[in-house]
Amino acid sequence: MAGPRRIEWRRRWPQRAVSNFGWYGAVAALVVACVWLLFGGEPDRLDSGASNPLAVVPPSVTVAAVAGALVMVVPVLRWPLVAADHYALLVRTGAGRMLSLPWVSVAEISLVTVGHERYLLVRCRPDPDRPGDRPSRLDRAPLRALDRRARAGTTDGYDLAVPMRDFLGSVEAQVTALAAFAPDSVTFAGETY
């Protein structure tokens, strides 16, 4: 979606998240079915009158499988996001929260390629009084994953990494559109756009 006041990168269908959720659902259903077949006929009480600990196994495994499914469905429903207006850069790196980073707090935006994947890196100004959101540990998860794969020093000083595989369209066109909303104080570095 593009407009005179705001841009938002079009997102690609979350094939990986849907695939992971499907595999989890299949394996969880198989495990739950096996547990119910093995322990479903257990009586609530033993012959001695004591409670049977095996009787709680099937419902417990079912509750755990449903809880795991809820965790697995979140990335299917909440896709990564990159949007911008003349006030702020809006970023959601994964299924977590959306960060509002006012342009005054953004120092640099860079594009790097590691292996066959491209990443948009965002460096924030080190001002503790800066406005906007602060990236949390969950928000930095893609940056940590990139740091493990990249050569030393590639991600030093950056606060966020956004995998470009999650978005449709030309990377150069996306970053150029982003640069049109950024003030001159924001540096665009890395690959040429």
Image: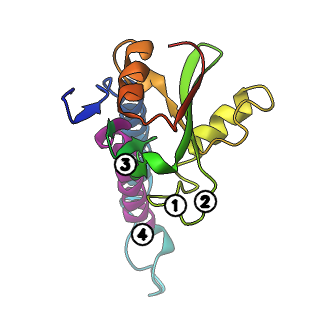
Three-letter amino acid code at disc 4?
Ala
Q: Quadrant of the N terminus?
A: top left
Q: Earlier in the sequence, mark 1 or mark 3?
A: 3
Q: CA distance from mark 2 to mark 4?
A: 57 Å
Marks 1/4: CA–CA distance: 56 Å
Name the residue nearer the viewer: 88 or 78: 88
Gap in angstroms between the C-alphas marked 4 and 3: 23 Å
Distance CA(mark 3)–CA(mark 2) = 40 Å
Which residue is depicted at the point 33% across and 36% down? Answer: 83
Q: Name the element at disc 3.
A: helix
The one of 144 and 67 positioned closer to us in this rendering: 144
What's drawn in magenta, residue-wise? 57-83
Between 136 and 129, the residue placed more toward the observer is: 129
Q: Nearer the viewer, residue 92 or 191?
A: 191
Which callout, 3 or 2, points to the residue nearer the camera? 2
The image shows residue 136, relative to residue 115, as above or below, that is below
- Mark 3 = which residue? 69
Residue at numbered disc 2: 127
Looking at marks 4 and 3 on the same chain, the residue that comes earlier in the sequence is marked by 4
User: Which residue matches tag 4?
Assistant: 55
Left or right of 108 on screen, residue 47: left
